[in-house]
Image: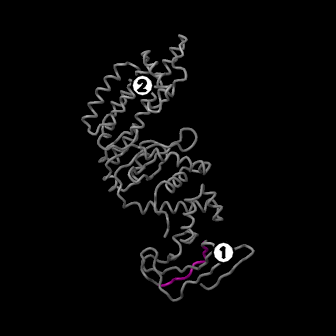
Amino acid sequence: MIAVEIKEGEKVVEIEVEWPADTKVACPECGRRCGVYDHAGARWWRHLDTMGHTTRVCCRVPRSDCPEHGVRTVDVPWATGSSKFTLEFEARSVELLLAARSQSQAAGFLRLGWRQVHEIQERAVARGLERRSTEQIERVGLDEKSFGRGHHYGTILTDLDQRRVLEVVEHREQASAERALESLPAAQREQLTVVAMDMWPAFMNAAATRAPNANIVHDRFHVMKHLNEAVDKVRKREHAELSKESLDWLSGRKYLFLRSPKDWKHEEKICFRELRQKDLKVTKAWGLRESFQHFWTFTTRVGARAFFDRWEAQALAVKLQPVTAVTTMLAKHLPGLLSYAVHRVTNAVTEGFNSKIQMIKSAARGFRSFANYRIAILFHCGKLDLYPL
């Protein structure tokens, strides 16, 4: 250090640093110790504040004269690459970004522009992803997430065991899911034992292509959602038929059939018993939905398959179109359903990120690009080692 200047009017401290003379420097390409060719122009780095004053470090960085790589600007010990911030300042910035509600709030605390804060966040995610490459990952989940208005979706890959987001890719096509899986090194993909997902063919094809050693497990919550929708469709159609006969038996009963019986109030239990005595179509559909819950209790493929065969026969026998459609779909995806009996995993971890991702979107009041959306999700949900030190 050769000079310190305090500018009280601007509340700035400027520290001028001089590289030691007559010293060898390391080539940034190969690390070889070599002579100094010359010194580049002065560069500035933002450092941690000094007593409320913005602190900047200035230095004319030497350029190495490497016999192999020629003239190169050397790396400084207090910053990385082309960053305009010291390592200590970036570490502090990461702490604030993790604690702040938004990038704008963090930018206000740090007295930086939005773009500068985003660059710090982007470098932190890049560091974290690079450090993550050697970790063991065995069970992952694939799911879709809404990005913006309309039908703009992204594909999200999660680590089901360590409860973290691994990658986010724009769109929900097979190519998108393949890119998400390809974010893992080939050795990691070969070690995957499970890919949990709904019954979306694009995701199934991507898993079969990019993680061929893994078992596809269809998410039980998505399956039950389809069955719930079938029950509701039967209710709507039957309610319309009864209304033509001036019968209001199903008026205001939507949530009675969608809620679990254990959540019913006393009057709802009485109401359901009365409806069941009328031998309605919706009570039959509801009964099939409830009986399918037993499928998830089996711990062997053989037992689960035997139960499904019996249930399928009963479901088709009632001849209710919405129920028949879901039953046919489940039969088509039976291998992925039976895998649940062995692996006992769901995509609940992925679904659990919905609220946090929504908070990230709301705090940002929208993102300029999907790339920025991806960085924010990985920063807050990726459990990455983000710090530069």
Q: CA distance from mark 1 to mark 2?
A: 68 Å
Of the pair 68 and 239, the residue shown nearer to us: 239
Q: Residues within 10 Å of mark 1 (few under 14, many from 20)?
A: few
The residue depicted at 46 percent of the width and 62 percent of the height is: 385
Judge whether residue 386 is colored magenta.
no
Name the residue furthest right.
9
What residue would you read off at disc 1? 51
Of the pair 205 and 129, the residue shown nearer to us: 129
Name above or below for residue 127 compared with residue 41: above
Q: Residues within 10 Å of mark 2 (few under 14, many from 20)?
A: many
Q: Which residues are magenta?
A: 35-45
Element carrying mark 1: loop
The residue depicted at 27 percent of the width and 32 percent of the height is: 305
What residue would you read off at disc 2? 286
Name above or below for residue 124 compared with residue 336: below
Amino acid under label 2? Trp
Q: Position of residue 163 (x, y in %)?
A: 42, 52
Judge whether residue 44 is colored magenta.
yes
Disc 1, disc 2: CB below 8 Å? Answer: no
- Mark 1 vs 2, N-terminal side: 1
The residue depicted at 34 percent of the width and 33 percent of the height is: 294
Q: Is residue 282 left or right of residue 119?
A: left
Q: Which quadrant of the figure has residue 69?
A: bottom left
Q: Position of residue 190 (x, y in %)?
A: 31, 52
